[in-house]
Image (spheres, grey):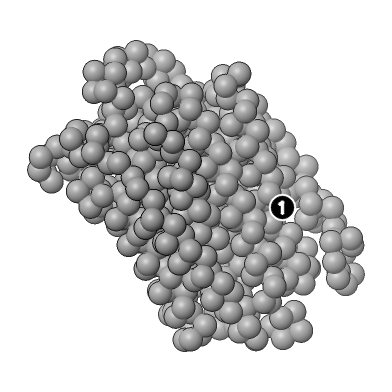
Amino acid sequence: MSHWRIKLSLLLNYFVFAILLNSVGTVILQVQNNYGVSESAASVLEAFKDLTIAFVSFLVASYITRIGYKRAMLIALGMVTLACLLMPQVPAFWTTKLLFAATGAGFALIKVSIFATIGLVTNDSNEHASFMNFLESFFMIGVLSGYFLFTLFVDDTNLKSTAWLNTYYVLAGIALLAFLLLLSTPIDESRVRLEAPKTLAEDLGDMLRLAIKPVVLIFIITAFTYVLMEQGIMSWLPTFNSKILNLPTSLSIQMASILAASTATGRFLAGVMLSRVSWYWLLIVCLIGAAGLVLLALPLAADVDGRIITGWGDAPVAAFIFPLIGLLIAPIYPAINSAILSSLPLRQHGPMAGLIVIFSALGGTTGSIITGHVFEAYGGQTAFYFSLVPISLLLVFITVFSRMQKKTGYEVKQTAGMAGH
C-alpha cells in the first residue's frame, strides 16, 4: 500500500501547527505594542501553550490508541480552526492566552498521533529517521512561512493597530483544509490496536515504566534542555531584533525567519547526512559550532548604532549572523527522537511520543520564561548569551545518552523485533 497520502496529511498537519506554535515570538512583540504588557507578562504566552501541551499529552498519550490517531488529529484541527476565528473577533490579551491554550492542546494530540503514525508508514529505522528529519524540516518551513504571513498584516505606521489579527482568518482556512484532507485519508491503525494493552491502567503503566528506564530518562533530560535553548531563542528573536537591533516591527518579524530557514535547511541536510555519518559526532560538531556562533554574533550586536533602518539592505550584520545558529542546532531534536522511537515496539510509540511532547513542552516554557525575565532585567544580549549554558549541558547529555544507548541498544532492538516492529 502506498502511504504518500498519509504522509502528505501528516506534513500539512505539522505545517499548520508550526505556524501557530511558533507565532508566539511574533505575538509576544505585538501584545507588548497592542495591549501594553511587559516582557515578563508576555512570556506567559509560552506557558499557556507549553503547559497545555504537557498536561494534555499526559492525559492522552497513554490513551491515544483508544481515541485513534486519525480521530485525535481531527479533533485538534477542528479546535484550532475555531480558536483562530475567535482571535480577530475579540481582540484582547485573554483571547491570545486562550488561542495558545487551544493550540497547545491541539498540538499535544497532533504530535503524539503523528509520531506514533510514522511507525505505521515506514519500514525500518533508517526510513524512520529520514522521514522524521524531513517532517521536522517541513515544520520549520511552516515556521518560516508564518513570519512572512504575519508581516503581510502588520502596520508599521501604527503600533496600536490590530490589523495583524486578520492573519488568523488565513490560518483558520489552512487548518480547515488540513482537516478535510485528513478526513478523506484512510489510515490503517489495526496493528497498533491489536498490540495495545487492554486497560487504561496498563497504558499508564507502560508510560511510567518507560520514563524510569535510565536510557529514556537521560533522553528526556536531553530533549528538555534542547527545547529550553531553542524556544528561548526562537520566542524572543523578534523582540531582540526590535529592541536591541532597532529594526522596525515588520522587519523584526521577517528577519526572525532566518532562524526558521536555517533550521529547516539544517534538518533537511541532516536527513541526507544521517544515512552516512554517526548521529552522535554530527551533533557534537554542531553544538561546538553553535557555541562559536553565539560568541561571534552577539558582540556584533553591541556595535549597532542608532541609525534608522528601513529594510534588509541596511540591517546590521548581527541580524543575519545570529539566526544561523538554527543550521547548527537543527539536527539535534529529530535525531535523538528518532534514536529512541525507532528502538521501541510499535505499541510503545504512543506513550514514548507522549513523554517527548510533555518534556519538550516543559523545556519550551522554561526557556521562554527564563529568557523573558533575563531580557527584562539585564537586556537582550545577556539573555541570548544564556544559550551557552544549555549548549554546554547538551554536549554532556548527548554523550551520556549515546553511551547508554550503545550498551542497551541490542537488548532493546531484540525486544522491539519480538514485538513485530
At a point 64% along the width and 70% down the height, the residue shown is 150
Q: Give how far across and how far down residue 290 sits, in percent.
A: 67, 37
In the image, farthest residue toward the front? 1
- For disc 1, the marked residue is 258
At a point 39% along the width and 51% down the height, the residue shown is 185
**Can you say whether 7 is above or below 394 in the image?**
below
Q: Is residue 48 visible?
A: no
Q: Give how far across and how far down residue 347 sits, in percent.
A: 25, 34
Number of numbered tags placed on the structure image:
1
The one nearer the camera, 104 or 421, is: 421
**Can you say whether 146 is above or below 156 in the image?**
above
**Quadrant where the N terminus is found in the figure:** top left
Q: Is residue 98 visible?
A: yes
The one nearer the camera, 267 or 72, is: 72
The one nearer the camera, 278 or 122, is: 122
* Horizontal arrangement in the rendering, residue 267 relative to residue 123 (left or right): right
At a point 36% along the width and 17% down the height, the residue shown is 409
At a point 57% along the width and 21% down the height, the residue shown is 275
> Residue 23 is drawn in which quadrant?
bottom right
